[in-house]
Image (cartoon, rainbow, N blue to C red):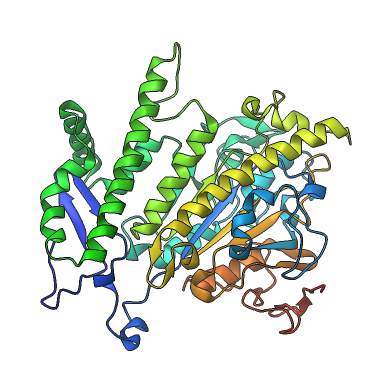
Amino acid sequence: MSLHKSWHLPRRTFLRGLGTIVALPVLESMLPASRAAAAGAGKLPVRMAFVYTPNGQDMQNWTPKTLGPDYELTPTLEPLKAFRKDFSVLSGLAHTKARANGDGPGDHARANATFLTGMQARKTAGADIRVGVSVDQLAAQKIGSQTKLPSLELGCDRGRQAGSCDSGYSCAYQFNFAWRSETQPIPPEIDPRQAFERLFAAGSKADASEARARREHYQKSVLDFVLEDAKALQSKLGATDRRKLDEYLGAVRELEQRIERAEKFAAALPDYSKPSGIPADYESHMRLMYDLMTLAFQTDTTRVATFLAAHDGSNRSYAAIGVNEGHHDLSHHGQNQLKMEKIAKINKFHTTQFAYFLGKLKSVKEGDGTLLDRCAVVYGSGIADGNAHAHHDLPVLVAGGAGGAIRTGVHREYPIETPMANLYLALLDLMGAPAAKLGDSTGSIRDLASAVGDGPAEIIQRGFFGRWRK
């Protein structure tokens, strides 16, 4: 660790110890001294994340009835009330490549595989899988070299990478979210401990494993190994930065302790086959993953993340909220009102967890705003109504202002069949990773920063128009 003579800290300052590296959040002493500097290398980065929930939504409880900023929150969106000015609902977007298009059944596998790629998955249960490069990996290819991790892939379901999972589609389609190439998926990490180690380990995997084994043997925290470096840094910081650093290191330790508790609880369960670090409680598992994403963004360890909350077709039950039947089974409700109400409860559970994530991002101060202000987070599903396996008018929202580039707090509607990939092209532009084409894109949506009365929404090249309803 080294400091400039002016005591201006480089953005890339780390605390280091044996097999451990702890990146720091944005401190006042890291900020540029002038606006001119802010326009250059010192500018705070934008982060991009994608969160996927399975089996579609009960759309009547998802879709607001009016457009613009004065729409009324629906029951499914109600848990996000505290953040209504921090996200926008986007209606009308579609993934037409998730439809059969001559390939027969398999909508759940296609929904998962298409969501970030916009491509039709080759129908195969063998090794000859093919779909396309996902939007997160297009971003990682262009800006990933600027961070310790080019991207971070998380999930909550143990995956299967081979065999048939959905009507002749390979399990690789259904249990993966990010695709490095058209034939190479990136399995999400489901163990919070392993994800934690990725964020804070230094050196090779062997070095990281050795450091972890030593910590466990001496019952040490990851922070114990960087304590000397931390003390040296704190002696040079102002009062505000010292307080912020203390709060950040406390948050790292608190997360580490929660993972440790999850490991102890898991180890006590008879015949419990999951690896250590995975809580038995789904809500706890999700929140640990959301915390890890927050830390990864806060420390600029990565600027690109994906979170597969559950794979499409998941038949997980939700006994904690009074739903004992499987999610997938309920999604084929046949207009049964009781089943639809249970689907709505599951949907609301997921938005409640997402609200937790937004709260974490918003609690982190960065520059003259918050971490959420510097993010663009897409939340949604590759299926709209689960009973119909619909892939148009998808349930989608975008949270965070992307550094002021996105106007939040509104409900926008695009023409039916507008490719979801058009949104992704716009987000890639905001990330400084522009792409001419992604999947079935027809052009880049460019109205994300517009306010009511600024004119119609546009999609460059094809002249599609979104609309406001006052």
Q: Residue at x 68, y 35 (%)?
A: 313
Q: How many marks?
A: 0
- Nearer to us in this view, 420 or 85: 85
Does residue 105 appear to the left or right of 49 in the view shown? right
Residue 301 placement (x, y as % from top left): 34, 57
Q: Residue furthest front?
A: 239
- Nearer to us in this view, 370 or 189: 370
Which corner quadrant of the image does residue 216 belong to? top left
Does residue 29 appear to the left or right of 431 in the view shown? left
Residue 234 placement (x, y as % from top left): 16, 59
Q: As displayed, is residue 400 above or below residue 80?
A: below
Q: Quadrant of the C terminus?
A: bottom right
Q: Is residue 460 visible?
A: yes
Q: Is residue 187 visible?
A: no
Q: Residue furthest bottom?
A: 36
- Nearer to us in this view, 200 or 167: 200
Q: As displayed, is residue 178 above or below residue 416?
A: above
Residue 151 placement (x, y as % from top left): 42, 55
Q: Residue at x 26, y 65 (%)?
A: 240
Q: Residue at x 11, y 61 (%)?
A: 235
Residue 212 placement (x, y as % from top left): 22, 35
Q: Residue at x 32, y 35 (%)?
A: 257
